[in-house]
Image: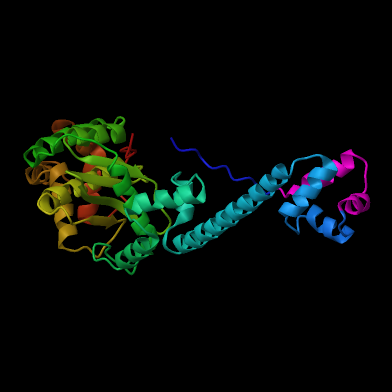
Amino acid sequence: MTTKTMIPFEATHPGTVIRDEINARNISQKELAHELGVLPTFLNEILKGKRAITADFAILLEKSLGISADYWMRFQSQYEIDMARLKEKNVRRIELIETWNIIKEYVPVKHLKKSGYLIGTLIEDIIKIKDIYKVETIEDLVKTVAEHRTLSFYRKSEKLEINQTNMLAWSKIAEFESDKIIVPYFDASKVEQLQKDLNLVFFENSNVKDRTKKLLENYGIKLIYLDKFDKTPIDGFSFWSGNNPAIALSIRYKRIDNFAFTILHEIGHIELHLKDDFERRFIDFIGSKDKDTYELQADEYAQKSLISDSQWKELLDFYTPLNDDKIIEFSMKHNIHPAIILGRACWEKNYYAIKSRIDKTLN
């Protein structure tokens, strides 16, 4: 059994006890110095903690004050031990501060504190950051951040202001949170049924976020909702977590059509790009126009999952020109939320100022 060493706030010099004794006995420093046979300045230095008590002086105190020499020597020894421990503690504190200053250059500490990940002492927060970034040392952390600032899967856009440090931290938190989630085995052959189940949830538009999370997890896909950091214009993030695919979404969705499209876009990445490649990651940016082949494929996947080609052809053949009544009629026939149909129509025509009474609110 180990005993925790208690380090005092400050070390107490035995001269403090001598001062208390002479005050209690109502004698002066000069009188005690004369009785001990030492200079008053010598005694004053001991009382102020500037001089150590020696064995010879401890014997003099024993004779004069009646307090054993062993007591004074033990007191002096403990004082020196406490001073050494305090020095060690201060050195460690300085090392922690220096480490923390390095961390602040590579980690958005403000966002991690705001999100509740850093709430302890410096040493506890440093350990938490190492856990989130999955590194053993601060040198590894610096290397990880430096390497990821230019990774290809962080697609760049001149129109989007992106902070790569914040982006990496957000993705690391997504991976950190996904590690906590336990879900069943992911069976890629059941994704088509998952699409149907999701479309029903979107159509009903009731408690959508919670129902979507539960549904995806039942099918073996981890889903995490995270607050967005500054200059991290993220729609979604899809990646592999342990033995399961995972999706992280920024908590910004207020429209059912946007939410539904993003969920199926990320499932598209899983189905088309991730199920056979456990190392690849996809971060999708809000409103990004410069999409690569993978993003265009995921967009098309989401589009066709929400409204099939045959359904869209039927809409164009028999329900145009579109209005709210026709959209709602088509919606009820195929169990597709009207806001999703309206959103597709706006996208196809590249016209988003269509007047409509259809409620797009995510519930």
Magenta part of the protein: which range? Answer: 12-36
Dividing the picture into quadrants, the one containing residue 8 is top right
Q: Nearer the viewer, residue 177 or 10?
A: 10
Dividing the picture into quadrants, the one containing residue 141 is bottom left
**Residue 16, magenta (yes or no):** yes
Q: Main secondary structure of the magenta part?
A: helix
Q: Nearer the viewer, residue 249 or 330?
A: 249
Residue 355's spot in the image, x, y percent?
32, 46
The answer to whether residue 118 is left or right of residue 17 is left
What kind of colouring is applied to the model shown? rainbow
Residue 347's spot in the image, x, y percent?
23, 53
Q: Is residue 160 visible?
A: no
Q: Nearer the viewer, residue 134 or 360?
A: 134
Quarter of the figure with the C terminus:
top left
- Image label count: 0
Residue 98's spot in the image, x, y percent?
51, 62
Residue 63's spot in the image, x, y percent?
82, 44
Q: Note whether 219 is above or below 141 in the view shown.
A: above
Q: Is residue 209 visible?
A: yes
| Residue at (59, 57) in percent of width and height | 87
Quarter of the figure with the N terminus:
top left
**Residue 317, magenta (yes or no):** no
| Residue at (20, 54) in percent of width and height | 348
The answer to whether residue 52 is left or right of residue 182 is right
Q: Nearer the viewer, residue 8 or 132?
A: 8
| Residue at (86, 61) in percent of width and height | 41
The answer to whether residue 321 is left or right of residue 111 is left
| Residue at (30, 57) in percent of width and height | 287
The answer to whether residue 105 is left or right of residue 59 is left
Q: Note whether 121 is above or below 103 in the view shown.
A: above
